[in-house]
Amino acid sequence: MSLHIPPALTHRRFRLLWIGVLISVAGSRMQFAAILWHINQLSSQPIALGMIGLSRVIPVIIFSLVGGAIADVFDRRKILFVTQIVLISTAGMLAWLTWSDQIQLWHIYILTVIEAIASAFDLPARQALTPNLLPAKDLPNAFSLQSIAFTIGAIFGPALGGLFIGYFGQTSVYLINAISYLGIVIALGMIGPVAQEHSVRKGAAPVSWEAIKEGIQFILSRPIILSSMLLDFFATFFAAANALMPIFAKDILGVGEIGYGWLLAAESVGSAFMAVILSQVQELRHQGKILLGAVISFGIWTIIFGISRWYWVTFVALALMGASDTVSMVIRNTIRQLRTPDYIRGRMVSVTQIFFMGGPQLGELEAGLVAQFFGAPIAVITGGIGTILIVFGIAKKWPQLVTYDGSEDLPPQT
């Protein structure tokens, strides 16, 4: 199989956003690694790590639906400018509090809440903007490339995060993250205005409960989208364990900051490898079966991760979890975006955001609670078992997901 330039990267505006996201994700993942390590230094209780998930999920639940409605009404590019300013500010505040030796757990949780609020508006706008930057035929390739950007950033971010934590301290990581958000700001400036359809009818309020309800009803009326959302939510709820990584690194595997950073990067190593493979695939058929198989694989490798007491076995298990999740993520994103008209795409993303962000964040809280009483390995192993069981439940409830092959007619673009 000969390599070629992915079709989506031939479009300048998408290419600019892709580069900006790559830089930003690296900084964000550095900060995430630093925050978990920081929390574990301030408190040895597993529930303290689990609380970071609660801090991130509450804003997602409260603000995602509003964020999606706003993304369908207002200029998505301008929304992204605002969210990046907020994210720069939160990272800067973490750096200052840490440098001045005033940082406490509640500071981290509050700033995480503010960051999550910004993300609740950022993600619907950014995902809904993507289809406006390139032709529909290149959209599956674009989502594969976005997965590559995320996973490459998520490899170098935690790896460098562990290195910088070990040699320069947490403050340096928070500062680097603040600077990294400028990648998206610069990209947005170079992209220029982007045309989009708007959902506001004459005389209607820009953002209303009716508009939000329309997005919810759209999801509920599309079994393929709904079933893929629920699969994502429950799989990530049961198998989320990144918040416990400092415990695995220090107490179970006996490694320091650098080894910890690479453990957090391991899933992304597998994701990047798989995303490159998928970017070379011209057409992916039997998507339903592949999706379900990928989630089962994710659950199996999660169990192995929980059982392992050897660093490299753990690293490989995490990498294969990442590879499995990337297959699932690309198919889910393609299903959702291609089967959603542009005028409601922001609200569709906002509803799904509650599921695909809420699942892992609530899962981190659940993992922290289970680990508090039964230990971190049990929390991970039972999560992997739960993931596998949920696949069979979803397949039984929505058999059309099993037979979905990606060739079904797309919805009309109204």
Image (cartoon, rainbow, N blue to C red):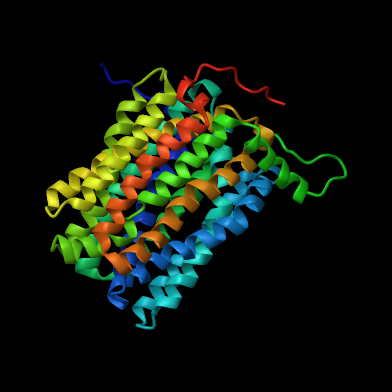
Q: Which of the 4 quarters of the picture holds residue 166?
A: bottom left
Picture coordinates of residue 129, whole percent (x, y) = 58, 38
Picture coordinates of residue 179, whole percent (x, y) = 41, 59
Picture coordinates of residue 199, whole percent (x, y) = 74, 38
Quadrant of image for the N terminus: top left
Name of the residue lying farthest toward the right: 203
Query: Where is 11 relative to 198, above or below?
Result: above
Using residue 261 as the reference point, say whether residue 287 is left or right of it: right
For the point 42% across and 51% down, the residue is: 237
Q: Which of these two is toward me, 182 or 130?
A: 130
For the point 61% across and 57% down, the residue is: 63
For the point 20% across and 61% down, the residue is: 249
Q: Which of the 4 quarters of the picture holds residue 30?
A: bottom left
For the point 18% across and 60% down, the residue is: 258
Q: Which of these two is toward me, 296 or 176?
A: 296
Query: Where is 24 relative to 389, above or below?
Result: below
Query: Where is 346 relative to 265, above or below?
Result: above
Number of callouts: 0
Residue 146 seen from this side:
no
